[in-house]
């Protein structure tokens, strides 16, 4: 063995010339390593593959002409982007490669941005400067941020776009869940525009809870809120029986009676299921409240709490007081103050109290609470941060109760604790944390929510958009969100509108709900007499609509107050009500309008005007002549979106003549049998001068 | 001496082999207690979701025997192109012969072929292929516009929240899934109908002109959505990602 080695050494380095030659050869070979490595590099391999693929296509010439070899780079200093992704993803800008399914040669799906302006990593994350697949796509020692999974891609839209976008439903849903499901009660979220995300839900005050319900119910609710109402947004704190016992003891002991709350209770709940059901229906309670029906389906809206088992929860005297005037118990409630009479309160409360589940509290037996239990309960209530969401007398809302999430989308992976078996990435961490928060250790306080997998993906998307980039963006790139205005109507009418909770459904000047029409220009739109009639007896304007305006049993004085205010204040400056009369159009104009209505513009596709029409989309127009003003109809014909942004009626860009003829035709539709209303409307016209300022 | 070399060599080879072999972390397949002869779709095919996201409804398939009666306890495995995830990826059919899985689509835009397979008595593979549709940004925007402006007339199906206007119209609009008709209309003609209304192409005036309400890119987005959901698929619906 040793001899062999010696002879080999002799052969290679025996004399100086030979040694020189061998060393030179070794040197040359090692010099060749770099170019060879470059020659066999991954991107070159992909570029060759691309050219081979392109060769056999019919558009080979164009594609070959567009092709540029070598390392490609998009450099955007102001965004901190150095992206070499296009070195391998060669076909990104070739729309004709739409049919190619092999990566990295696909064309990029159509988006509103140009590759050269934003690069790749702004949206997709990953390491832009890398030139190998594993370094570019995966987390490495030098680069933590891997490629963002496709299901969270909308989070990147949210870095610049601070408001909702029509093409990013998941991001929009995630953001609204953050404020609607109460996340931001505990977690502070400072948005990049300097505002703090506000909670959109309204957890009830617990300061007077003993008026409303029993300790047994509180106990059962704390143990499992979804057992009482499957749609409840209150999370499950996984409390032990003892803890729930003590917390319920404290909450009841801490409760003080609400002044005037249960006063003047003469009515007794009457049991008349038929009358109750019809009053529940007439009052359109289901527009806001859901009830689970026998088939297990949830029927109704989600503005108010679910009422499936409400009879097992509320005390009868509280319910009656609430129905009589909800604002006495909770001044900020979204529930309107229906002016129900004693008989109606009795009927409706009887109907609701019958919605009880005898099993729900059957196994809850609580002994009288001891002072120690109450003290312990108080400690638990402040430990679990109940006051972050609920007002509780004697307990202050905690500051910074939970970690701030303003930059959660850039949290370093090294700072995260992962569960065994889960992927070590930030999106997986966030999603798992939302899904099972208590799995990450004992003693954690974050409760268990009941989100669907799709909701968890949405929330994760919204949270990932809160990152370093969104906070350090060049101001020119940020697209601002429109924030809800804090518009409040003034005076007596304003108080009345708050009392009736108009803003729970209607939107005015950028404030309010979206269940019912925007009323910002209502004063320009409708005729006074129609509005008065409508308040007294609201009918529906649209067929096939399940949510409707309820009747509030207003007095004549209240109706006049509201009507005067609306007719005076909610005026569109571009509409001159006097510019077009409510009558007096020539027969020719009306006839031309009819032809346009049924012919050129085929309005009968969406509207009902005649018995033969069946359009289900727009409002019924049989009485439109006694409802709307001519000036409004004319403007609406010219440009509906100008009067109500987002309305689905298409803008037909009508000529002045067409718009006038259609106005003449529509204003003549006063609804056959209602001549008195028509007459009233006509007489009403001159008085509207008051409405103009 | 040589024996020691041999030992070292085998050790090195063994080490290399274990480190190079890919980890298989999938749980062992459950043992089937019965075998069927056919596998059929119960629900969940032809769904629309954004690329990379969860399908709104789970996919449910049923295993039947030769007589067409449901078979409980048959093993069903789901598979699809790279990037598609199943939860669970396999399992035994329940007492009604069905198995349910939640499907997340891959990150690419286009159509995904999903294969549900079971083995019959002679261990021959029986397959069922389903197709699901993954939307990109443009199609998602199109879907939003469709829900807002088009669907009330073009979708004949009513829900409690949204009553269809389809039956009210004298001239019936084409549902967007009607590929046989819509695939024959070029992008340019579709754009003309949407922007200028039905009469632009001698069609019904019940289809209004949207050109002043929707922007050009909105109309493009709508067309890309229509192409994406048409059945049979339009040529520009993108590639079909199948298991390779």
Image (spheres, rainbow, N blue to C red):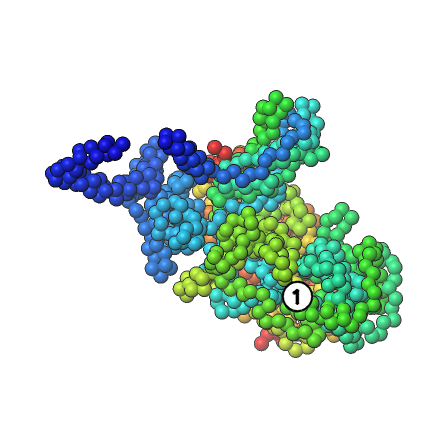
Question: In screen coordinates, is A45 left or right of A20?
Answer: right
Image coordinates of residue A312 in percent, x first then y, are 81, 59
Image coordinates of residue A104 in percent, x first then y, are 39, 41
Q: Quadrant of the N terminus of chain B?
A: top left
Viewer-proximal residue, B237 or A449?
A449
Could you say which quadrant of the image residue B172 lies in? top right
Quick check: A530 above or below A131?
below
Labels in figure, total: 1
Label 1 CA crowd tier, 10 Å (few <14, some 14–19, many 20+): some
**Which secondary structure lies at badge 1?**
loop
Question: In screen coordinates, is A543 left or right of A369?
Answer: left
Quick check: A100 above or below A443?
above
Write the residue at 39% across / 33% down.
B4
Viewer-proximal residue, A616 or B229?
B229
Image coordinates of residue A145 in percent, x first then y, are 44, 53
Write the residue at 85% across / 56% down.
A273
**Which residue is the site of mark 1?**
A384
Write the residue at 50% across / 34% down.
B243
Q: Is residue A631 visible?
A: no
Viewer-proximal residue, A486 or A682?
A486
Question: In screen coordinates, is B63 left or right of A277?
Answer: left
**Residue found farthest to the top:** B122
Viewer-proximal residue, B72 or A507?
B72
Subunit of label 1: A
Image coordinates of residue A357 in percent, x first then y, are 81, 55
Quick check: A114 above or below A625?
above
Quick check: B184 above or below A318?
above
Write the residue at 88% across / 62% down.
A270
Q: Is residue A228 visible?
A: yes
Could you say which quadrant of the image residue A567 lies in? bottom right
**Residue found farthest to the left:** A17
Could you say which quadrant of the image residue A122 lies in? bottom left
């Amino acid at each position: 063995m040793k001899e062999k080695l010696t002879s080999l050494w002799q052969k290679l380095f025996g004399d100086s010339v030979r040694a020189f030659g061998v060393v030179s050869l070794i040197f040359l070979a090692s010099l060749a390593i770099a170019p060879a490595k470059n020659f066999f590099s991954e991107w070159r391999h992909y570029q060759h593959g691309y050219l081979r693929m392109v060769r056999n296509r019919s558009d080979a010439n164009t594609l070959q002409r567009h092709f540029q070899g070598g390392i490609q780079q998009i450099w955007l200093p102001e965004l901190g982007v150095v992206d070499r992704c296009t070195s391998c993803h060669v076909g990104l800008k070739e729309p004709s490669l739409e049919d190619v399914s092999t990566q990295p040669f696909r064309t990029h799906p159509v988006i509103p941005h140009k590759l050269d302006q934003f690069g790749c990593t702004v949206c997709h994350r990953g390491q832009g400067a890398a030139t190998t697949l594993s370094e570019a796509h995966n987390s490495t020692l030098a680069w933590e941020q891997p490629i963002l999974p496709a299901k969270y891609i909308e989070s990147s839209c949210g870095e610049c776009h601070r408001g909702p976008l029509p093409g990013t439903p998941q991001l929009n849903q995630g953001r609204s869940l953050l404020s609607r499901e109460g996340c931001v009660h505990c977690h502070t979220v400072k948005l990049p525009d300097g505002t703090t995300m506000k909670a959109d839900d309204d957890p009830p005050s617990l300061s007077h809870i003993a008026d409303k319900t029993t300790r047994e119910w509180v106990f059962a609710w704390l143990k499992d809120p979804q057992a009482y109402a499957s749609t409840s947004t209150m999370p499950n704190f996984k409390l032990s029986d003892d803890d729930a016992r003590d917390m319920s003891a404290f909450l009841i002991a801490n409760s003080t009676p609400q002044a005037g709350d249960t006063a003047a209770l003469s009515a007794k709940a009457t049991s008349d299921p038929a009358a109750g059901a019809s009053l529940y229906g007439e009052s359109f309670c289901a527009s806001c409240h859901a009830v689970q029906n026998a088939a297990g389906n949830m029927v109704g809206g989600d503005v108010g709490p679910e009422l499936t088992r409400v009879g097992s929860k509320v005390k009868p005297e509280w319910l009656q007081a609430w129905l009589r005037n909800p604002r006495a118990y909770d001044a900020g409630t979204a529930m309107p103050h229906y002016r129900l009479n004693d008989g109606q309160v009795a009927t409706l409360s009887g109907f609701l109290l019958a919605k009880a589940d005898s099993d729900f509290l059957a196994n809850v037996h609580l002994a009288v609470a001891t002072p120690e239990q109450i003290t312990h309960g108080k400690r638990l209530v402040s430990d679990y941060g109940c006051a972050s969401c609920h007002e509780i007398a004697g307990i202050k809302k905690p500051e910074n109760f939970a970690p701030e999430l303003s930059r959660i989308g850039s949290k370093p992976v090294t700072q995260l604790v992962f569960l065994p078996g889960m992927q070590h990435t930030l999106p997986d961490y966030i999603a798992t944390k939302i899904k099972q928060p208590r799995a990450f250790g004992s003693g954690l306080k974050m409760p268990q929510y009941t989100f669907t997998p799709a909701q968890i993906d949405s929330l994760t998307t919204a949270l990932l958009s809160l990152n370093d980039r969104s906070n350090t963006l060049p101001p020119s790139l940020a697209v601002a969100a429109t924030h809800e205005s804090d518009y409040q109507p003034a005076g007596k009418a304003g108080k009345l509108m708050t009392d009736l909770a108009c803003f729970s459904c209607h939107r005015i000047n950028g404030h309010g709900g979206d269940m019912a029409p925007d009323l910002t220009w209502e004063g320009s739109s409708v005729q006074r007499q129609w509005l008065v009639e409508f308040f007294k007896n609201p009918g529906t304007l649209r067929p096939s609509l399940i949510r409707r305006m309820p009747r509030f049993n207003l007095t004549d004085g209240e109706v006049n107050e509201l009507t005067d205010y609306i007719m005076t204040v909610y005026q569109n400056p571009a509409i001159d009500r006097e510019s077009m009369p409510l009558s007096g159009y020539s027969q020719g104009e009306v006839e031309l309008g009819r032809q346009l209505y049924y012919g050129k513009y085929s309005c009968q596709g969406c509207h009902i005007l005649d018995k033969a029409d069946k359009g289900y989309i727009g409002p019924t127009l049989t009485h439109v002549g006694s409802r709307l003003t001519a000036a409004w109809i004319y403007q609406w014909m010219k440009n509906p979106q100008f009067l109500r942004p987002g309305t689905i009626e298409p803008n037909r860009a009508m000529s002045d003549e067409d718009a006038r003829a259609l106005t003449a035709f529509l204003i003549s539709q006063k609804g056959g049998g209602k001549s008195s209303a028509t007459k009233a409307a006509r007489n009403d016209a001159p008085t509207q001068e008051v409405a103009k300022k | 001496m040589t024996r020691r070399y041999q030992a070292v060599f085998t050790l090195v080879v063994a080490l290399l082999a274990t480190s190079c072999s890919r980890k298989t972390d999938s749980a062992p397949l459950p043992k089937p207690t019965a075998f069927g002869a056919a596998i059929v779709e119960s629900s969940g095919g032809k769904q629309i979701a954004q690329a990379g996201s969860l399908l709104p409804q789970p996919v449910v398939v049923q295993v039947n025997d030769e007589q067409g009666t449901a078979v409980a306890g048959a093993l069903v495995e789901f598979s699809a192109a790279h990037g598609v995830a199943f939860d669970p990826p396999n399992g035994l059919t329940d007492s009604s012969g069905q198995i349910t899985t939640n499907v997340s689509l891959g990150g690419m835009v286009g159509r995904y072929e999903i294969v549900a397979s079971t083995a019959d008595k002679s261990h021959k593979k029986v397959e069922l292929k389903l197709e699901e549709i993954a939307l990109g940004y443009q199609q998602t925007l199109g879907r939003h516009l469709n829900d807002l402006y088009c669907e009330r007339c073009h979708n004949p199906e009513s829900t409690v929240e949204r009553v269809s206007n389809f039956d009210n119209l004298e001239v019936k609009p084409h549902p967007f899934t009607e590929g046989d008709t819509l695939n024959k209309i070029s992008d340019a003609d579709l754009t003309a109908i949407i922007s200028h209304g039905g009469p632009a192409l001698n069609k019904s005036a019940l289809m209004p002109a949207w050109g002043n309400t929707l922007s050009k890119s909105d109309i493009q987005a709508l067309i890309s959505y229509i192409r994406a959901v048409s059945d049979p698929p339009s040529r520009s619906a993108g590639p079909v990602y199948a298991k390779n």
